[in-house]
Structure formats: C-alpha cells, structure tokens
Amino acid sequence: MKVTHMRIDDRLIHGQIVTAWIAASKATTIIVADDVASKDATQQMLLKLTVPAGINLIIKSINETAELLNNNASEESILLIVRNPASALALFKQGFRTPVLNVGNISNSKSETGRKCLLPFIYVEEQDVKCLREIAELGISLDVRAVPNDKSIDCLSLIKNL
C-alpha cells in the first residue's frame, strides 16, 4: 500500500478530510490507525458514515496497521490518519516510514491539563512534544497545515521553546 499522505488529526474523519485531503492525496482508501476506534463499533459506524462513496475505509489498531502497511505491496493510494503524535510514533517504531507527517489537529480537550497552544488548532502537552521531536529525529518532516492550500509551517519551529 502506498501512503500518499499521513495526518495527525484527533477528529479522525471530518469535513476537511472529506472535502480537501482525500483529493489532495489522491486517496482511494482511508486507513484510520487508532486503538480506540478499532474496538468501538459505534465509532466505526460513525466514521463509515462520513466517508464518501467510492472511498474504502479501513479501521485498525496501531499494531494491525503497521503489519498491514509493512506487508502489503499494493499500489493503492492511502490517506493514513492517526489520532495523536504517540500513535504516529508507534507506527514508525514498527518500521513504517513516510517522508512527511502532516500535523493537522490536536484539540484542547477540557479533560487534559497543561496543554500549550501552538496554533488555534494545535494544543500540545509534554508527551506530544516529546513524540514529535522523536519523529523528527527519524528524519520525518513535520508539516503543520489544516488544509492542503495552507502554507506549510515547520512543527519543530513551533515547539523549539517548549
């Protein structure tokens, strides 16, 4: 499988994905790599309802996704979505690689404290910053954009003083 775009977005599939990122990535399949969604039938049903006709949806755990990506030689174009930096790092630690990781949305959840606002759509805590730095050390570029037409911002420049 050929991942044409990988994105961190804690909302998983939503309007920006459907209206912009599928087309920009030329994806025929979306893979949601998420341990919670892979075990939650209600979340799976809701995610399936958001995907346009003609686009395949695969929802797998992080481990299952790593196995699928590392062992499938298909040339199918994939939009890969993970919920947070820790999930992205877990995939990379299992051997999957992509040259660029799009940091799209990390919400300021009221249940989590200590989050710092980098941009109106990106709030990070210490663990997120640690994971993003570790991903960058693997040679993966961290591209911050909400939608494809936005100007790319280097994530490391946003977290350098944290």
Image (tube, rainbow, N blue to C red):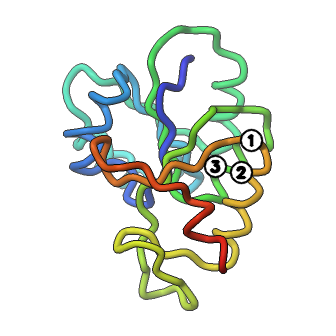
Q: Quadrant of residue 105?
A: bottom left
Residue toward you, 24 or 155: 155
Q: Which class describes the residues within 10 Å of circle 3: few (<14), some (14-19), or many (20+)? A: many
Q: Amino acid at mark 1?
A: Gly
Compare marks 3 and 2 and give the one earlier in the sequence: 3
Q: Amino acid at mark 3?
A: Ala
- Residue at 80% from the left image edge and 44% from the top image edge: 93
Question: At numbered mark 1, what does the secondary structure look like: helix, strand or loop?
Answer: loop
Number of marks in picture: 3
Name above or below for residue 53 compared with residue 125: above
Q: Which class describes the residues within 10 Å of circle 1: few (<14), some (14-19), or many (20+)? A: few
Name above or below for residue 65 compared with residue 75: below
Tag in front: 3 or 1 = 1
Name the residue carrying label 1. 139
Which percent across, then down, holds residue 112?
53, 85
Name the residue carrying label 2. 136
The numbered disc on residue 101 is none
Separation of marks 3 and 1 at Cα, in angstroms: 14 Å
Q: As drawn, is 46 to the left or to the right of 38?
A: left
